[in-house]
Amino acid sequence: MILKIGVLASGRGSNFQAVLDAIKSGRIKAEISLLISDKPDAYALTRARNAGIEAFYLDPKDFFSFSPAKDAYFEKIAEEFTAKGIGLVLLAGFMRIVKKPLLDAFPWKVMNIHPALLPSFPGLHGQRQAEGYGVKISGCTVHFVDEGMDTGPVIIQAAVPVRHDDTEDSLSERILKCEHKIYPEAVRLFAEGRLHVNGKKVEIKGARENETPLISPPIEE
Ligand code: GRF
């Protein structure tokens, strides 16, 4: 049976698009069945609808009367994904901490992409933090999601050089190109049943040399 993917997004959705494109090209054997956004004007909603994928806005405020409100919101999301037979949940620029009800319903089946080399620079603005710190190498990380902030087991990372004249924007742009490579790659490995979480480590079964861009080559522009 084909893997069904559910997506949570808050913004432009370029990583969602990268995964969708990899599915369309046949590189990933899966389908995206549902996209849910916590923002009514997220461009990710438009991208999904343009691709004929069911997508809707779910207002977190509708769950404020429940206690605890944040858990109720994620209970609802878990229900929606379960009803669709989702086997993998992708956070694609989703600007909320995922709560237990969703993680319990999808154990080691929720992935996130973060624009820094974790465990460095977790949380908001990973690119700004890296540029401000003055590191010479940053990058991006795909990881399984646990209850912490960007603390779950790492699946794939790509390194990106930081240049002396970089701004937050120029670095973000260079990192984003790598994000669009490694997120589909992680999803492909998952769809092929090759990712196994062992404590803090993710083993990639049957990894062939140069199959996985664990470290990206410098990007020439
Ligand atoms: C990306 O930089 C991702 O790493 C971070 O949020 C941003 C989302 O961009 N989690 P997009 O919505 O996928 O274009």
Image: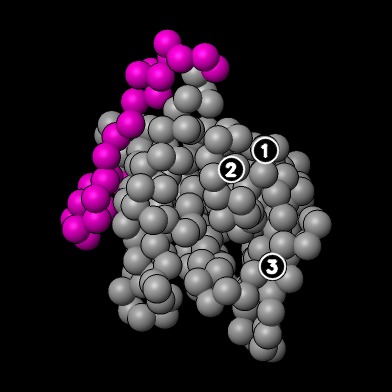
Q: Position of residue 31 (x, y in %)?
A: 34, 66
Asked whether mark 3 lies closer than 8 Å to ligand 1, one says no
Residue indicated by mark 1: 147
Q: Can residue 118 be spotted in the picture?
A: yes
What amino acid is found at the position of numbered circle 3 in the picture?
Answer: His
User: Residue furthest toward the top?
Assistant: 65
Q: Position of residue 59 (x, y in %)?
A: 34, 25
102 relative to 163, above or below: above
Q: Position of residue 36 (x, y in %)?
A: 35, 42
What amino acid is found at the position of numbered circle 2 in the picture?
Answer: Leu
Is 92 covered by the magenta stretch?
no
Nearest the viewer among 42 and 159 is 42
112 relative to 196, above or below: above
Residue indicated by mark 2: 103
Asked whether mark 2 lies closer than 8 Å to ligand 1, one says no
What amino acid is found at the position of numbered circle 1 in the picture?
Answer: Glu
Whole-angstrom CA distance, mark 2 to mark 1, is 8 Å
Say the numbered circle drawn on residue 171.
none
Q: Nearer the N terminus, badge 2 or badge 1?
A: 2
Q: Nearer the N terminus, badge 2 or badge 3?
A: 2
Magenta stretch bounds: 44-68
Q: Are the residues tagged 2 and 1 within 8 Å (C-beta)?
A: yes
Q: Can residue 113 be spotted in the picture?
A: no
Is 47 covered by the magenta stretch?
yes
- Please tell me which residue is depicted at 53% across the width and 77% down the height of the picture: 192
Q: Position of residue 187 (x, y in %)?
A: 51, 67
Q: Nearer the N terminus, badge 1 or badge 3?
A: 1
Say the numbered circle drawn on residue 196.
3
- For numbered disc 1, what is the local secondary structure? loop
Nearest the viewer among 163 and 198 is 198
